[in-house]
């Protein structure tokens, strides 16, 4: 059976066809042979403002196996759940005149960034803010209603819900911009480990997986804990031909930049790169394009991408799938699990082959043997299993 033939079966199960050719391959299973995990990306962030207790609880109700709190530090050293150290995009801080003077410019991964930074607010001040949905296309009706939670509050929620539901729910924290936090005297790693120790989560079997886009902090964590670690793999974009585009600051882990290491994110998913990851981590978390790329078409040769759905716009719906890569296979051969991101249900974020059906995308990646998916819509990820 060819790669495409097998992928076509998965897509056909969701009611659509397949149109690209590729080399032969055998059906892949997950590393353990168990079903893939569903990781709620920032909670049920497709429905509620991200990184709130309410979004996490909704995700748990939808059947997510793990919830993902991205972690940043406050001025007084408390870990809170925000996607970035910057607060402007996901809170109402810009609407609060008492904090207007806190807006400042700092370098984040080498880029001058003007915003309100969590590290300039105490926890008490952070608790005055309210979360908002940062994607304009999504429901804005719950903006201003929910607090920004601490890591301790997230852990308490997970423990309570696990006991109440009789199933284990895990947390999947990401250390956000470790080099940035270290430079301002607010290192994340030991604070995270202290919270996990307090929760009695210190073993590989604990319901915790720690992730990072940087490398050196994961290597440090490996010397301090036995909980599972994941190396994330990013990129800036993908070009018309399906090639990964690497542009700073998304060309390489930022600690590589600081150390003068020329390797890129793409180097991390080569066989040699994966072998190095295996020395300090348990899994790898590549952007899904590293696993199943797509490209634009230009059938008339006019140098412009074809508008496949004829809506006057060029987006993911005008891309066609290519043959899967060997990233999952190569990682599994080394004993690394693969958790890929980010799955979203909006039709404009789905390649043309999926015909606007998010279930088809999940089924395609499940068929490729991924061990877990990060989803803004965990109910859709669960239903597609």
Image (cartoon, rainbow, N blue to C red):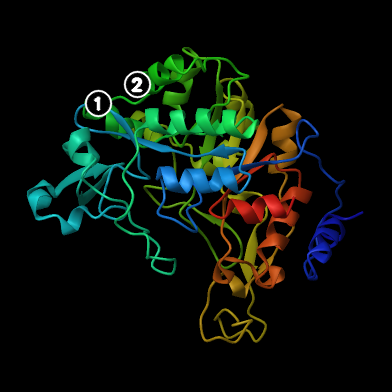
Q: Which circle's residue, 1 or 2, is located before the other in the chain?
A: 1
Mark 1 sits on what residue?
77
Q: Is 239 located above or below residue 317 in the figure? A: above
Q: Between residues 257 and 308, which one lies in front from this camera angle?
A: 308
The residue positioned farthest toward the front in the image shown: 164
Q: Is 310 located above or below residue 220 in the figure? A: below
From mark 1 to mark 2, how far is it between C-alphas? Answer: 8 Å
* Mark 1 crowd level (few <14, some 14–19, many ≥20, 10 Å Cα): some
Who's the residue at 64% across and 56% down the image? 380
Q: Is 213 located above or below residue 321 in the figure? A: above
User: Would you say 260 lies left or right of 120 here?
Assistant: right
Would you say the residues marked 1 and 2 are in contact, meaning their CB atoms lie under 8 Å apart?
A: yes
Who's the residue at 44% across and 36% down the image? 262
Who's the residue at 65% across and 58% down the image? 293
Q: Between residues 357 and 19, which one lies in front from this camera angle?
A: 357
Image position, residue 223 (x, y; %): 48, 12
Image position, residue 14 (x, y; %): 78, 65
Image position, residue 370 (x, y; %): 71, 43
* Mark 2 crowd level (few <14, some 14–19, many ≥20, 10 Å Cα): some
Q: Which secondary structure, mark 2?
A: helix
The residue positioned farthest toward the right in the image shown: 1
User: Would you say 57 lies left or right of 96 here?
Assistant: right
Residue 181 in which image quadrant: top left
Q: Between residues 149 and 271, which one lies in front from this camera angle?
A: 149
Q: Which secondary structure, mark 1?
A: loop
What is the number of the mark on residue 304?
Answer: none
Mark 2 sits on what residue?
191
Residue 317 in which image quadrant: bottom right
Whether residue 42 can be seen here? no
């Amino acid at each position: 059976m060819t790669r495409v033939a097998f992928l076509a079966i998965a897509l056909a199960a969701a009611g659509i066809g397949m149109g690209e050719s590729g080399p032969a391959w055998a059906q892949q299973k997950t590393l353990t042979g168990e079903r893939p995990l569903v990781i709620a990306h920032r909670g049920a962030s497709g429905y509620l403002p991200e990184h709130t207790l309410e979004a996490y609880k909704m995700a748990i109700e939808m059947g997510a196996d793990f919830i993902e709190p991205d972690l940043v530090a406050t001025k007084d050293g408390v870990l809170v759940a925000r996607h970035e150290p910057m607060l402007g995009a996901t809170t109402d801080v810009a609407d609060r005149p008492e904090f207007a003077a806190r807006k400042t410019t700092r370098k984040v991964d080498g880029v001058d960034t003007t915003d309100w930074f969590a590290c300039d607010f105490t926890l008490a001040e952070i608790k005055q803010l309210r979360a908002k949905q940062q994607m304009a296309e999504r429901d804005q009706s719950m903006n201003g209603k929910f607090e920004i939670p601490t890591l301790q509050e997230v852990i308490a929620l997970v423990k309570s819900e696990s006991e109440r539901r009789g199933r284990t729910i895990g947390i999947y924290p990401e250390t956000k911009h470790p080099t940035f936090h270290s430079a301002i005297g607010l290192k994340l790693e030991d604070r995270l480990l202290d919270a996990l120790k307090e929760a009695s989560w210190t073993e590989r079997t604990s319901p915790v997986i720690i992730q990072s886009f940087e490398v050196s902090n994961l290597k440090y964590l490996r010397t301090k804990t036995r909980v599972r670690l994941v190396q994330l793999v990013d990129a800036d974009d993908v070009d018309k031909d399906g090639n990964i585009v690497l542009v700073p600051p998304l060309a390489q882990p930022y600690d590589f930049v600081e150390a003068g290491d020329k390797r890129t994110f793409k180097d991390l998913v080569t066989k040699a790169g994966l072998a190095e990851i295996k020395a300090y981590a348990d899994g790898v978390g590549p952007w899904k394009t590293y696993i199943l790329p797509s490209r634009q078409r230009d059938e008339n040769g006019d140098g412009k991408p074809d508008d496949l759905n004829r809506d006057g716009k060029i987006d993911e719906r005008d891309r066609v799938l290519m043959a899967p890569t060997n990233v999952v296979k190569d990682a599994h051969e080394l004993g690394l699990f693969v958790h890929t991101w980010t799955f979203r249900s909006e039709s404009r974020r789905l390649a043309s082959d999926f015909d606007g059906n998010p279930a088809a995308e999940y089924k395609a990646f499940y068929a490729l043997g991924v061990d877990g998916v990060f989803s803004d819509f965990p109910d859709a990820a669960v239903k597609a299993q």
